[in-house]
Image: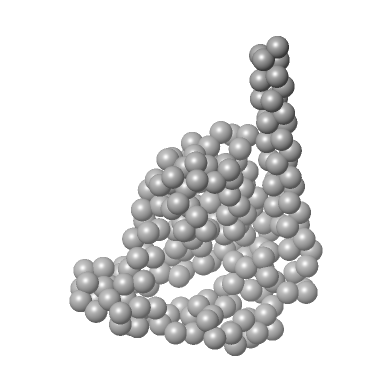
Amino acid sequence: GGVVTTMCLLRPDIFDGVVLIAPMIYISDDMMPDPAIVTVFERILAPLVPAAKIAPNNENLGKFAWSDPEQVRQVGQLPLTLGKDRLRARTAHSLVVGCRWMSGRLREFRTPFLVLHAKGDRITDSAVSKRLFEEAATRSEDKRLLLLDSDFHADFMSGGPSQKKLMDSALTEVITWMTERDAAREVGAGEVVAEAVHDSK
């Protein structure tokens, strides 16, 4: 989500529209280390030892992502699961700086979008998705916000069998938004063709 948001800010017309799933536009305070540690990383560690795997881990990452303990266990066994290894100093620094950069430029966002976010998300802050919806320069008819009734970051995307109803609701919203936009684009294209034919007579 953060990568796509950055691309849209730099090149607003790169996509016809985007679906943002709990985007990392801002890191929740629950996930951030003490401000003094952040300062040390920014000013000393990231420049001096950028490849060192020394960024502090948040042991609650899995518990904040899924409500089902079995889902937490299964995902935790995957070799590339975030949180199993410490982030490199430069990577951690880039995440903080990138989120700071994005959250300060929400008014410049012009790409059509649908953003979905769990209301109580403690990994990425849903309040910033709400800010994006309210502040983005995207036309009001081209942006939509869906705040889901959940406290977990990933339940509505990959919550497992116990969260099927929530996942179905989110998926339906995505399909509806994409279908409506596709239909509107076809109507617009048809009108352009009809006008061109009329003008040629």
Residue 127 in sight: no
Looking at the picture, tell me which residue is in the foreground, 178 or 60: 178
Q: Residue 109's x, y, as percent?
A: 47, 42
Q: Is residue 56 left or right of residue 119?
A: left
Image position of 9 with respect to 193: above or below: below
Spot the residue most to the front. 201
Marker count (numbered) = 0
Image position of 166 with respect to 48: above or below: above
The scheme the figure's colours follow is one colour
Looking at the picture, tell me which residue is in the foreground, 29 or 185: 185
Residue positioned 65% across, 50% down in the render: 146
Quarter residue 156 falls in:
bottom right
Q: Is residue 26 left or right of residue 76?
A: left
Residue positioned 69% across, 25% down in the render: 193
Residue positioned 30% across, 82% down in the render: 52
Q: Residue 73's x, y, as percent?
A: 63, 85
Image quadrant containing the C terminus? top right
Image position of 106 with respect to 73: above or below: above
Q: Residue 14's x, y, as percent?
A: 50, 46
Quarter residue 22 falls in:
bottom right
Residue positioned 53% across, 37% down in the render: 138
Q: Is residue 12 left or right of residue 158?
A: left
Q: Residue 87's x, y, as percent?
A: 39, 78
Residue 49 in sight: yes
Image position of 193 with respect to 26: above or below: above
Looking at the picture, tell me which residue is in the foreground, 154 or 51: 51
Q: Is residue 132 left or right of residue 166?
A: left
